[in-house]
Amino acid sequence: MKIADLPKNEKERLKTLFSYGILDTEHEKAFDDLTILASEICECPIAMISLVDAKRQWYKSRIGVDIDCTSRDVAFCAHAILQDEIFEVRDTMLDERFADNPLVTNSPHIRFYAGAPLKSPSGLNIGTICVASDRPKTLSSKQSKSLLTLATSVMSQLELKLQSTKLILANSYKESFLSNISHDVRTPLNAIIGLSDLLTKNVELAAQFPAVTENLSQIDLSGKQMLKTLNALLEVGKIDAGVLNLEITHSDPSDYIKFVVNNLMIKANEKSIKVDVQIANDIPKTVAIDEAKFGCVLSNIINNAIKFSHSNSKVIVSASVLNETLILKVVDSGIGIQTEKIPYLFNQFAQITGQSQNNEGSGLGLSITKGLVELMHGHIDVQSKNKVGTTVTVSLPYKNVPTPSSSNIQTKNIPDTTNILVVEDNKVNQMVIAALLGAIPVQFKIVGTGEEAVTFGTNADFDLVLMDIHLPGISGIEATRRLRANKVKIPILALTADVYRSSREKALFDSFLTKPIALDQLVDAISQNLLIQATT
C-alpha cells in the first residue's frame, strides 16, 4: 500500500478547507442529492463527498458505507486531491498502491474508485466527490464529465454556505455595533436634551436670565439635531438589518401633520418660505398608523422641499384620503431634479441637488423615507422638472378607529400618591430622571443595580418601575424576570438608549422608552400604564 504524498500547498489547502466551516457538520439534503446523483450516473453502489483534512478523510455525505471518516493514510481521496481531473482506479487488485489497502481487503472491499477533486476558487483541492464499487469498472466519457460537473456543484454549495455564514455574521456584527452606538451616544444625549429641555421651560429662570435661557435653547436645539442625525443612521441600519418593526398607535393625522410642519417653520422662516397646509375635510379624526415613522417620512420630505426651494417661495403640503389610504403630497417650486437623476434619489448617501451647490446633510433622508414607506406597505413617487420644482407623493394605508369620546380619562392624570421605583446606574441619567419626575407630582426612589431593583420591587410598595436595561451585575432584563417570578404585577417600563432590543425582550415590559426621554413622553407612558393597571 502506498500512502499519498502531501500536496505542495498543503498548508494553504488546509486553511482553505477550514475556512468553509463544513467539517463535522450535519448531513444536508443539498449535498445528499448530489451524492445520490453521482451514484446513479456512475452506476456505483458507493458514493461520497469526502473532505481531506490533516489526518483523515471525512464524509459530508455518503451512501453505501456506514462510517463517517477514515484515516487519511488509507484514503483513496488523498491521492485524488493531487490531481486536477478524475482520479480513477479501475481494479484495485491490479494496482500496487491499493491492493493491500484495508478498504480493499476488508469492508467495503473496494475494487473500483473514481474521484473528482473539489477545487476551491483559489485552485486548491479540499476533497472529492467520489464513487466506488466492489467490482472492477471503467467510467464512460459521459460519466467522467458528469462527475466533474457534480464536483463543481458541490463547490457551489460550499461557496453558498460560506457566503451565507459571512452575511449572517456581518449582520450580527453590524447589529451589535449599531446597538452599542445607539446606547453610547444616546446616553449623554439623554442628559443634554433632558436637562436643557427642563431648564428652557423654567419660567423663573427665563425671566431672570434671558441670555442664559437663549443659550440653553441653542444647546437643546443642537442636541436634538444630533439626535436626528443619529436616528437617521440607526434607521438605515435597522432597515438593512431587518429589525425595524411597525409600532401602530392611534393618531390624529391632521393634528400630527400640522405638528410636523410647525417644527420645520423656523427653517422655512429663515428663507421666507410660506408653507401652505391643505387638509381635506374627510380625513378621519383618528387612524391606526405608526405615528413616529409617519412623522419621519413627512418631516424628511418637507425638509427637502424647504431646503431646495428658493427664498420667498411657497411649499404646499396637502393631505387627502382614498380607499383607506392617506395621500400626502408635498409640492415646491424649487430647483427641481434632472429627470435622469430621479432613479438615484433613494440610494443611500446619494445627494441629488440639481443645480444647487447646497450639499449639506448626510444624504440618508430619502433612502430612509423610501424604506419607511415600504415598511408601512405604502408607495412613494417623485415627479420633478429641473429649475421648475418637485412633487413628492406618498400613499400610506391606514385603518379607521373610533374617535375617542370626551368621557375618556385624561392621559396625564397621575395621582400625587403615585410611588415610582427608578432603576438607573448612570449618575447623570439619575439626575435627569429625578428632574423629570420632579416636574410631576409623584414620589420616587432611585436605585443603581438590578439586585436592588429585585429587593425593593418585591418588598416595597411601588405603583410602577422605570427599569434601565444596562446595569452592573444582573441586567434590567434579568431583574424584570426575577420580579415577575416573585409575582410582582405592577407595570415595569424599560428605559434604554439602545434601539436594537429584540421583540422577545420588549415583551417582558409594559412599555419600552428610548432615551432621550422627553417629559411629555414620560408622563404619557406613566399615566397610560397606571390607567391600564387600574382597569385590570
Image (spheres, rainbow, N blue to C red):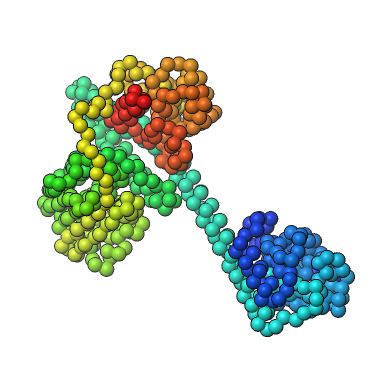
Residue at image coords 25%, 54%: 395
Residue at the bottom extreme of this rendering: 141
Residue at image coords 57%, 60%: 161
Q: Is residue 11 left or right of residue 263?
A: right
Q: Is residue 207 left or right of residue 434?
A: left
Indicate the quadrant where residue 104 lies: bottom right
Specify the quadrant that holds the C terminus.
top left
Instruction: Establish if 11 lies above or below 187.
Output: below
Name the spot of residue 91 as percent of width and height, x first.
82, 78
Q: Is residue 142 left or right of residue 329?
A: right
Name the spot of residue 28 as percent of width and height, x first.
62, 60
Name the spot of residue 21 as percent of width and height, x first.
63, 57
Instruction: Establish if 168 lies above or below 61.
Output: above
Pick the residue in front: 345 or 112: 112
Indicate the quadrant where residue 139 lies: bottom right
Q: Is residue 505 left or right of residue 32?
A: left
Pick the residue in front: 178 or 280: 280
Residue 149 appears in the figure:
yes
Pick the residue in front: 290 or 337: 290
Residue at image coords 49%, 32%: 477
Residue at image coords 80%, 61%: 71
Pick the residue in front: 229 or 508: 508
Indicate the quadrant where residue 337 lies: bottom left
Specify the quadrant that holds the N terminus.
bottom right
